[in-house]
């Protein structure tokens, strides 16, 4: 009874939960060494069946890095790939925006609950991704982002992707 109420509450906020045994759980994600036991999804759930390539990189990117991320996201979108990233500032933001502008499918994997937005400056972008793409997290609503959650988020980005393109990442970057 409590579980059904919890699921109804999530769905009333546009959030869906899929356990690893659910038919809606992305098959490709089951193939990573440490798949999440469940994921929370907001937006176009069916988008998770698409072929994705990840574009990730530094938050403090150069103008060249911004242009490279945008060009790659745009071109790969035109070729039919979905673009997945982590909704962080810098390269991630540019990849998501360029994909949306190219009318492609974008997915954001976040390191917090889907009722929050981090960074706050990407709130409008997160709303657009929810409307036109899909947002994924392994964390329940209310979970705030803390530094240790970002490496775990990155395994989901790579796990949902057929390949990862890293743009301007330093030696200690989480993207690596």
Image (cartoon, rainbow, N blue to C red):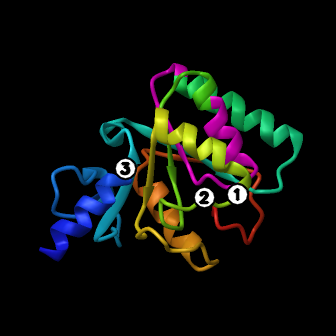
Q: Is residue 166 visible?
A: no
- The answer for how far apart the CA atoms under marks 2 and 3 are is 15 Å
Residue 103, picture quadrant: top right
Q: Are marks 1 and 2 in contact (CB under 8 Å)?
A: yes
Q: Residue at x 50, y 74 (%)?
A: 143
- The location of residue 133, given as percent across then percent down, is 46, 37
Q: Furthest residue to the right?
A: 63
Q: Are marks 2 and 3 in contact (CB under 8 Å)?
A: no
Q: Is residue 47 above or below residue 79?
A: below
Q: Which residue is mark 3?
A: 14
**Taking 103 as reference, is 40 left or right?**
left
**Taking 74 as reference, is 17 left or right?**
left
Residue 157 versus residue 165: which sits nearer the camera?
157
Residue 108 versus residue 163: which sits nearer the camera?
108
SS assignment at label 2: loop
Q: Residue 37 — which label? A: none
Disc nearer the start of the sequence (3/1): 3
Q: Residue at x 76, y 50 (%)?
A: 90
- The answer for how far apart the CA atoms under marks 1 and 2 are is 5 Å
What residue span does the magenta drawing correspond to?
78-98
Q: Residue 120 — which label? A: 1
Between marks 2 and 3 in the image, the one whose residue lies nearer the viewer: 3
Q: Which residue is mark 2?
A: 117
């Amino acid at each position: 009874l409590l579980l059904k109420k919890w699921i109804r509450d999530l769905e009333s906020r546009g959030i869906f939960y899929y356990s690893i045994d659910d038919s809606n759980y992305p098959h490709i994600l089951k193939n990573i060494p440490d798949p999440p036991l469940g994921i929370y999804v907001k937006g176009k759930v069916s988008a998770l069946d698409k072929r994705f390539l990840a574009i990730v990189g530094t938050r403090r990117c150069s103008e060249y890095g911004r242009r490279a991320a945008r060009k790659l996201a745009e071109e790969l979108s035109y070729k039919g790939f979905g673009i997945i990233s982590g909704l962080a500032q810098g390269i991630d933001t540019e990849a998501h925006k360029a994909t949306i502008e190219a009318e492609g499918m974008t997915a954001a994997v976040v390191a917090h609950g889907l009722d929050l937005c981090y960074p706050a400056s990407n709130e409008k972008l997160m709303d657009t991704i929810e409307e036109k793409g899909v947002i994924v997290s392994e964390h329940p609503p209310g979970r705030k982002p803390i530094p240790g959650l970002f490496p775990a988020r990155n395994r989901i980005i790579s796990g949902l992707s057929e390949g990862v393109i890293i743009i301007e990442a330093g030696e200690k970057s989480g993207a690596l």
